[in-house]
Amino acid sequence: MTDSLPVIDLAPLGEGEAELVRVAAAIGAACRDAGFFYAVNHGVPRAVMDEAFAQSQRFFALPLALKQAIAIETVGGNRGYSGLRHEALDPAQGPDMKEAFNVGVDVAPDDPELLAKKPFRALNAWPDLVGFRETMLGYFDACAALGARLHRAFARDLGLPAGFFEDKFDRPMATLRLLRYPPAADDAVGAGIHTDYGNITLLATDDVGGLQVRRRDGRWIDAPPLAGAYVVNIGDCLMR
């Protein structure tokens, strides 16, 4: 088993079937080993990532009352703000020392699925920050496109047609989640031990670090920041 996460270059994914198979094999090996890997040359422009981080910082710097006005428990549909100690990914470790803001697929007020009260269909809630909505929707779309490219690789490594997942994710329950972990005492937990429940997670980090991954043999390894990269991990659904 690896002591560090593999770094996989996604640039060849657009170069033909042979390259798709090669990259898919590398991704498949990483997913069967640690379940995590770094994705580089992934197609999401660095300027888009940087502006998303900048807008995220502006949001979390707002007064608490303004953030609470668009809280998840008010907005519904897994959209909006989640405050410090509001969640506990591992209840045995206590509440998480983090705050978050969730964005989902942007639907119109007259969307049929919204009117039918389909689960996880809701209107996004937006803070009063210039450019925030446009930045986050653009970033959401860029990450969704990356997720679709990765699913072509997953499909090929699983022996399926490359386009197998396309009609399964035409309107996904994907969530763009902004996260802030404030400085805390040594015994505070930023995010408790957990697995993710979806198909994949794309994690962009700042230069602070702190992420750890547990190998299948139970040993924890560090996943230090890699500038411009995404940490990718498979979730419970794809694992099954």
Image: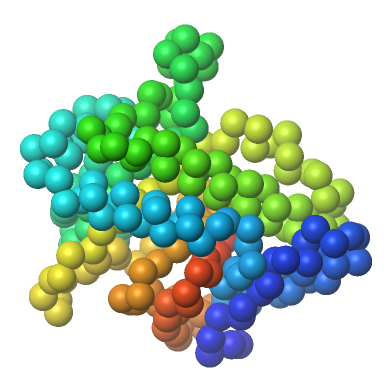
Of 119 and 58, the residue lying toward us: 58
Q: Residue at x 47, y 28 (%)?
A: 106
32 left or right, relative to 121: right
Of 165 and 138, the residue lying toward us: 138
Image x and y of residue 44, in percent: 57, 56
Quadrant containing the N terminus in the rendered view: bottom right
Image x and y of residue 155, in percent: 78, 54
| Residue 78 seen in this snapshot | no
| Residue 147 seen in this snapshot | yes
Of 191 and 203, the residue lying toward us: 203
Res. 179 image quadrant: bottom left
> For the image shown, how many numbered marks are present on the structure?
0
Q: Residue at x 48, y 53 (%)?
A: 48
235 left or right, relative to 100: right
Res. 182 image quadrant: bottom left
Q: Residue at x 40, y 67 (%)?
A: 205
Q: Is residue 41 above or below residue 50?
A: below
Image x and y of residue 137, in percent: 46, 38
Quadrant containing the C terminus in the rendered view: bottom right
Image x and y of residue 162, in percent: 83, 50
Of 114 and 11, the residue lying toward us: 11
Res. 206 image quadrant: bottom left
Q: Is residue 134 above or below residue 150?
A: above
Q: Is residue 34 above or below residue 2?
A: above
How are the residues colored? rainbow
